[in-house]
Image (cartoon, helix red, strand yellow):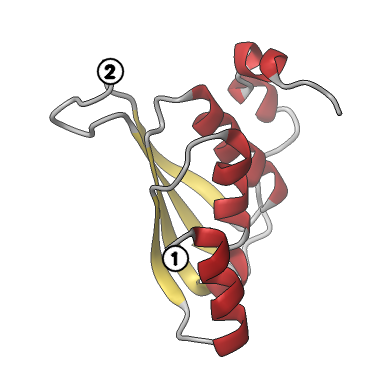
Amino acid sequence: QDFERYFIERRQRGGPPIGVYLYDGAHDYRSQLIGLLLAVPHLAERALLVVDDANFASVRQATWDFLAACPQARLLLEVRTPGNGHPDFWNGLQVLTWERGRDNGYSVADLPAHREAAFLRTLTPC
């Protein structure tokens, strides 16, 4: 099921908090970022968020933009692979921790080191 539809329907019908969330949907920047942001109201007090295909610059940028917006999240693990289809972690993996009461996100000084400059140049204004 499409992640956007899932979270809209889940918001209406409710459900138990999500303790582990795996995002393996579309890996364009918008889908990646919205896929993380829409999960936030549904997460348990403490949760893990697993992001697939982290070798893509769009995925890494969306993840770091999510981390900048949500101080409750921290990057726990990032595994890059030599290429897509690698036998260990396929096309890279990121694992984030979520703690609802945490308010010690990354500082503004930390974020520039994680900008995907080449990818950001491909984004065009409206």
The answer to which image quadrant residue 115 occupies is top right
Report whether 39 appears left or right of 19: right
The answer to which image quadrant residue 5 occupies is bottom right
Q: Residue furthest left?
A: 87
Label count reads: 2
Residue 111 visible at all: yes
Q: Amino acid at mark 2?
A: Gly
Q: For this rendering, which residue is in front, 2 or 106?
A: 2
Question: Can you give x and y, in whole percent of width and height, for residue 40 in the image?
Answer: 60, 65
Q: Amino acid at mark 1?
A: Ala
- In the displayed structure, 58 sits above or below 101; it is above
Question: Can you give x and y, in whole percent of width and height, for residue 39 in the image?
Answer: 55, 64
Q: Which residue is mark 1?
A: 47
The N terminus sits in image quarter: bottom left
Determine the residue positioned at 23% across, 34% down: 89
Mark 2 to mark 1 CA distance (whole Å): 28 Å
Residue 39 visible at all: no
Q: Can you tell which of label 2 and label 1 is closer to the viewer?
A: 2
Determine the residue positioned at 61% across, 58% down: 72
The answer to which image quadrant residue 13 occupies is bottom right
Report whether 110 appears left or right of 75: right
Question: Can you give x and y, in whole percent of width and height, for residue 98 in the image?
Answer: 51, 60
Q: Which residue is mark 2?
A: 83
Q: For this rendering, which residue is in front, 46 or 81?
A: 81
SS assignment at label 2:
loop
